[in-house]
Amino acid sequence: GENVEQHPSTLSVQEGDSAVIKCTYSDSASNYFPWYKQELGKRPQLIIDIRSNVGEKKDQRIAVTLNKTAKHFSLHITETQPEDSAVYFCAATVTGTASKLTFGTGTRLQVTL
Amino acid sequence: NAGVTQTPKFQVLKTGQSMTLQCAQDMNHNSMYWYRQDPGMGLRLIYYSASEGTTDKGEVPNGYNVSRLNKREFSLRLESAAPSQTSVYFCASVQTAISYEQYFGPGTRLTVT
């Protein structure tokens, strides 16, 4: 089955700096890669996703890049703000009727003032 | 729309007791999922239902059973709870014909003593 590894497990940045979180996946058939943000005590919520036919996707301050050859994808957050502090999870799946997500172990991002 | 709802929010069980976690969605989604979240381990898939009338095992199904009661509802049953099942349980759903974004419920925090 799919295996997703995520690094780093914790990340501390100063407000205004950029943050990068990296994930690798094992199944070359995986074609959908979402990123979820989870605030303390809350449910995970999708912040951005990318499909395998695209190399990069941006949404305001966040972007995701995908390297299919190397089987890795990354989340980039620019101009970080205190409200970006949360746990971020990457995931991968082969899309279909079931579309079972395999999640990474999470990155706790702390944005300090 | 309420989205994905879960009951109960919190539960404490003694070893050997049984209980059922309830999940319902009002978005007409075809696929539903049960995950458990443990510190440092991300979200792990317990069981899923790709469509009404079907259920399949995920990564960590031992000790659990599920029922897809109808298109809206997907329940998770612990027949004989063990301390190792202490976790936060999330239900999620998606309409895979339209999107692959999984929508999560608010979670159930279960403690088994």
Image (cartoon, rainbow, N blue to C red):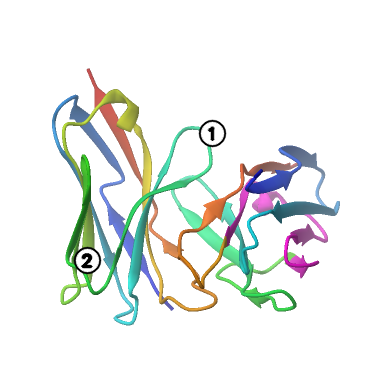
Q: Position of residue A45 (x, y in %)?
A: 46, 46
Q: Quadrant of residue A66?
A: bottom left
Mark 1 secondary-structure assignment = loop
Seen as rendered, the residue at the extreme bottom is A29
Disc 2 to disc 1, C-alpha distance: 29 Å
Q: Amino acid at mark 2?
A: His
Image height of A62 relative to B16, above or below: above
Instruction: Tell me the quarter of the image containing the N terminus of chain A.
Output: bottom left
Residue drawn at the location 15% of the way across and 37% of the way down: A18
Q: Which residues are magenta?
A: B65-93
Mark 2 secondary-structure assignment = strand
What residue is pinned by disc 2?
A72
Which residue occupies the foreground of this view, B97 or A85?
Answer: B97
Residue drawn at the location 22% of the way across and 17% of the way down: A113
Tell me the subunit letter for badge 1.
A
Which residue occupies the foreground of this view, B28 or B84?
Answer: B28
Q: Position of residue A48 (x, y in %)?
A: 33, 52
What residue is pinned by disc 1?
A41
Residue drawn at the location 55% of the way across and 70% of the way down: B59
Is residue B57 toward the left or the right of residue A28 in the image? right
Image height of A36 relative to B30, above or below: above
Whether callout 2 and callout 1 share a subunit is answered yes
Tell me the subunit letter for badge 2.
A
Q: Amino acid at mark 1?
A: Gly
Q: Does the stretch in magenta take in A54? A: no
